[in-house]
Amino acid sequence: MGPTMLAARFQQSVTPNALRSYLAEFISTFFFVLAVLGSAMSSRKLMPDATSDPSSLVAVAIANAFALSSAVYIASKISGGHVNPAVTFGMTVGGHISVPTALFYWVSQMLAAVMASLLLKLTVVGQHVPTYTIAEEMTGFGASLLRGATLGGPNIGPLAIGFIAGVGVLIAGPFSGGSMNPACAFGSAVTAGSFKNQAVYWVGPLIGAAVAVLLYDNVVFPSQSRDPVRGVPEAGVGV
């Protein structure tokens, strides 16, 4: 790729529509992370022994499902509703968005996650923002596989995406915290000042998203053309 092509890609990434996409990703990711981490803190407040109470896991899974469905819905027509660096990575691997655009998406998502975590830390007194940890029964490699396997495919309806996330929490929550969103794990880690096992929450989702996009493009719907900025079908069908 020559300098001229790179310059063209970068210019495409700073258009007004692209900037609206980054803002949409920031707002939707902020809302999602705030809801996910906030629900975990609320559960811990109501149930001091939340780690061993199954109802706490169900409550957090439901919060994840509805929060992600809402976040994807409000951003889908503007940015594609990625709300997740892994989804952005997958769309980049699939050639649906350019690398400069993906980097701006990542910055928006990561900044939103950190801001949401900091807001919870500053407003909720007496509790620390929860971080994601791996259970003794789970290896780092196994946790990465679980993260990738429970990440939903691209370009399905917001409600279905939310349900997949909720099921993922029910499956993986007791073993690795249930986070399929690297931004969420990163935001809480920044707030806590601990990045232990952080790679687990990146490697699995990134690989899972890339595989899902490639399968979707080449097996499920191999002929759809997409908007190069948002990575959504040009006909206007959001993810």
Image (tube, helix red, strand yellow):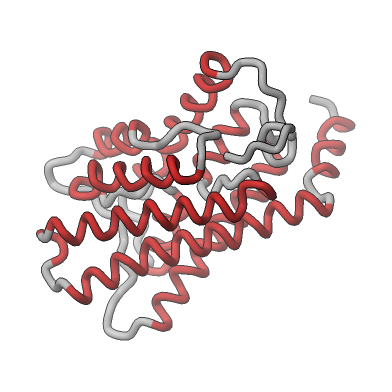
Q: Residue at x 50, y 40 (%)?
A: 86
| Residue sitting farthest toward the right | 4
Residue 195 is left or right of residue 141, and the answer is right
Q: Nearer the viewer, residue 194 or 31?
A: 31
Image: 192 above or below 52: below
From the top left corner, tell me how far across and down residue 43 is, in percent.
24, 69
Q: Residue at x 52, y 14 (%)?
A: 219
Q: Residue at x 20, y 38 (%)?
A: 139
Q: Nearer the viewer, residue 220 or 137?
A: 220
Image: 8 above or below 135: above
Q: Quadrant of residue 93?
A: top right
From the top left corner, tell me how far across and down residue 151 is, in percent.
39, 37
Q: Nearer the viewer, residue 194 or 231?
A: 231
Question: How many numbered tags mark residues here?
Answer: 0
Q: Residue at x 25, y 43 (%)?
A: 172
Quarter that holds the C terminus: top right
Image: 85 above or below 40: above
Quarter that holds the N terminus: top right
Residue 113 is left or right of residue 4, and the answer is left
Q: Quadrant of residue 56?
A: bottom left
Residue 230 is left or right of residue 210, and the answer is right
